[in-house]
Image (tube, rainbow, N blue to C red):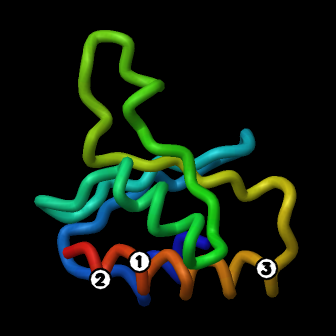
Amino acid sequence: MCDLLDDLMPPGTTHTTPEGGMFMTVGLPAGVSSMDVFREGIREGVAVLPGVPFYVGGGGEDTIRLNFSAAGEEEIEEGMHRLARVVRRLG
C-alpha cells in the first residue's frame, strides 16, 4: 500500500509506514479536504476515514485513515488507483 501511495498520489501527499495495527494515516496535498475525499471516494467505490473525528482538539481536515487489514492485494491495488483519481480530481 505504501509503494502504491508513493507511485500514484500527487505531490504533497504523505503517509505513515505501519509496523503493525490496522490503519495508516495519509496526509493530503494542500487544499484537499478529507471530508471531500470521503464523499468523492464513496462515489468512486473506495471508502476512507476522514481524519477530523480523530483530532479531539481540532484538525484532521487534511488527513485520512486507510484500513489495510481486511483487503487482499488486488483489492488494495484497485482501491489505491481509485483513491488517487479522487485526490487528483480534488487537487
The mark closer to the camera, 2 or 3, is 2
The x and y percentages for residue 38 are: 48, 55
Amino acid at dot 1: Val
From the viewer's perspective, tell me whether residue 44 is left or right of residue 88: right
Q: For label 3, count other residues whose C-alpha is less than 10 Å away and answer few (under 14), some (14-19) or many (20+).
A: few
Estimate the x, y position of residue 25 in percent, counting from the top left: 47, 48
Does residue 29 appear to the left or right of 25 in the view shown?
A: left
63 up-or-down from 76: above or below: above
Q: Quadrant of the C terminus?
A: bottom left
How far apart are labels 2 and 3 at the CA level?
A: 21 Å
Among all residues in the image, which is located at the extreme left?
Answer: 30
Q: Measure how far apart labels 2 and 1 are at the Cα level.
A: 5 Å
Residue 15 sits above or below residue 73 on the image:
above
- Going 52% across and 55% down the picture, which residue do you hit? 17
- Residue indicated by mark 2: 89
Task: Look at the numbered disc 1 and give the secondary structure of its residue.
Answer: helix
**82 or 28: which is nearer to us?**
82
Residue that numbered label 1 is attached to: 86
Provide the secondary structure element on which disc 2 rests.
helix
Q: Amino acid at mark 3?
A: Glu
Is 78 left, or right, of 72 in this rendering? left
Identify the amino acid type marked 2: Arg
Which of the two discs, 2 and 3, labels the residue nearer the N terminus? Answer: 3
Residue underneath mark 3:
75
Residue 70: % across, % down: 86, 57
Write down the quadrant of residue 76 in the picture.
bottom right
Identify whether 83 is placed above or below 53.
Answer: below
Q: SS for tag 3?
A: helix
Find the residue positioned furthest to the top: 57
The tag earlier along the polypeptide, 3 or 1, is 3
Mark 2 and mark 1 residues within 8 Å of each other at the beta carbon: yes
